Image (tube, helix red, strand yellow):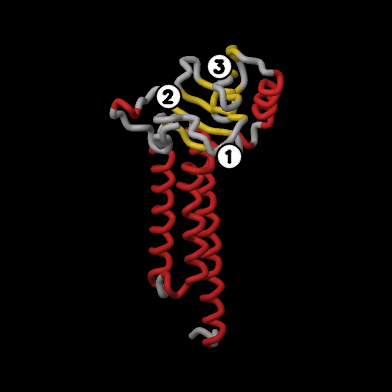
Amino acid sequence: MSLATAPETALQRTETHGRRFATALTVSGLLVAASGVVSWHLVQPGVSLVGPTGGGVVVMFAVLGAWSALLRPRGGWRAHLRLASGVLALSLIAPLWAFFGVLSASIALDAAAQHRAQVMVASNDVGCHQVASGSVGRLPAPYVVCMTNPGDGDVVTFTTIDRTRGYAYISSRLDLSWFPHQCARHLEGHWWAFNLAVNPVTGASCPFGYPENPAA
């Protein structure tokens, strides 16, 4: 016969549930972190974000599904509202990081690219040259760096060898349409990511994550 009292038994159950929740949170965090690492390696400027974002969505539903199964015999989500909010926020990180975070972070963390673009603008170094090593954000070498003066400001682009996609540093007003009827998205500050291989004017669809920009 067990000598444990009712309060002791309840305390043991609470401690057991607490350990299970802590373990589940750790596993969920590791899963989301792994998804973030995979997204970092998959995302490239100008390339459709369907795959990385879709993978993040799968991870999100996997985390939510596992927690639903864990909480169902313990009163469900409604009995753990604060925990549910935390789990939901954690699971949303995976798709949001893939869609919004990777490209912006990749260029924000690349101080060398920022410095190079600013130096080219300051020296009015118009023209193009190829770089054989290194990378800019998520754009690996070899890549092409070009400086142009379209009239309303200076534009420095870091593109693939065929110059169809990459990053653009625009040193001018940000309220202008720098990619009229082209597929591009603003990242942060003066930085954009674009894909010029697709021409929406002909009816082609822009890659997911790079909307067609309005006319100038």
Q: How many marks?
A: 3
Which badge, 3 or 2, is on the more N-terminal residue? 3
Q: Which residue has dot 1 on it?
A: 188
User: Is label 1 in contact with label 2 (beta carbons under 8 Å)?
Assistant: no
Query: 76 or 88: nearer the eye?
Result: 88
Q: Is residue 215 left or right of residue 192?
A: left
- The amino acid pointed to by label 3 is Val
- Determine the secondary structure under disc 3: strand
First in sequence: mark 1 vs mark 2: 1
Q: Mark 3 highlights which residue? A: 144
Above or below for 21 versus 1 = above
Q: Residue at x 62, y 15 (%)?
A: 126
- Label 3 or label 2, whichever lies nearer to me, is 2
Position in image of residue 37 (x %, y %):
53, 39
Q: Amino acid at mark 2?
A: Leu
Q: Which corner quadrant holds the C terminus?
A: top left
